[in-house]
Amino acid sequence: MSKNPIITDAEWARLEAVTPEEKEKALKKLARWITYEIVHRGFDLDYGPFSYDAMGGNAVEVISQECYDALFCGEWHWKPKRELSSMLIQIAKSKMGHIIRDWHAQGHPDIKLESGLSYREQVEMDIARQWEAEANMRELGYDLARKALDGNPKMLAYVEAVYETNDYRAVAKRLKMTLKQVQELESELLAILEES
């Protein structure tokens, strides 16, 4: 989702207030997410869209820096109440989807079948679409959930905690619950959303 390149005064104040410790913590969480996604999705760091050659450096470091720069340059707006790491992960989803699309658009897939797409290329393009959809649909999904939960303060508190942290442990800590209770709330939320 392209963002308006104008940074509001409130956003700038939040960006300026980020301490070096907060930045390091957020970037470490982002790096773990990027690493997990690259490895979990079967990408090869020696060849392909996330290789050193394609990225001009270590993919995790390059993407992390690009995400942080995108936020500080106003390419993306930092939503109020969102944790820095959660916002950076949303940006990474979009950027990583574009990296895959751009790499394949340059004619790099190693094996082309008669259909025009190799199996791995199709898998990678599906992953790109998923990441981009997650990045673009996140805001819409939370808005719809808030509307469906109007009048249910317990569930609204859960949705806000998930929106701000995107992490089970952080949600549990914020709501003073166990992980099991948080998972039960998640199941309850899904049931409510299915009904609505």
Image (cartoon, rainbow, N blue to C red):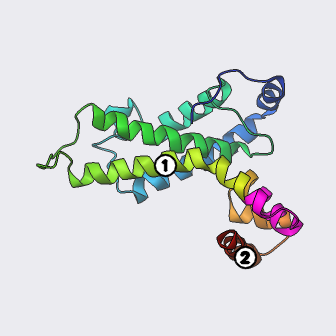
- Image side of residue 113 versus residue 120, left or right: left
Q: Identify which residue is drawn at 28% across, 51% down.
A: 122
**Residue on which disc 2 sits:** 188
- Image side of residue 110 versus residue 156, left or right: left
Q: Is residue 154 magenta?
A: yes
Q: Is residue 71 magenta?
A: no
Span highlighted in magenta in the image:
145-161
Q: Nearer the viewer, residue 182 or 170?
A: 182
The part of the image, by quadrant, that contains residue 7 is: top right
Image x and y of residue 69, in percent: 60, 27
Name the dominant secondary structure of the magenta segment: helix
The reply to whether callout 2 and callout 1 are in contact (CB within 8 Å) is: no
Image x and y of residue 153, in percent: 88, 65
Q: Nearer the viewer, residue 193 or 66?
A: 193
**Residue on which disc 1 sits:** 131
Q: Earlier in the sequence, mark 2 or mark 1?
A: 1
Q: Nearer the viewer, residue 132 or 191?
A: 191
Extreme residue in the front direction: 196
The kind of secondary structure element at disc 1 is: helix
- Image side of residue 188 versus residue 137, left or right: right
Amino acid beneath label 2? Glu
Is 137 situated above or below 153? above
Is 103 situated above or below 154? above
Q: Identify which residue is drawn at 65% across, 31% down.
A: 71
For the C terminus, the image quarter is bottom right
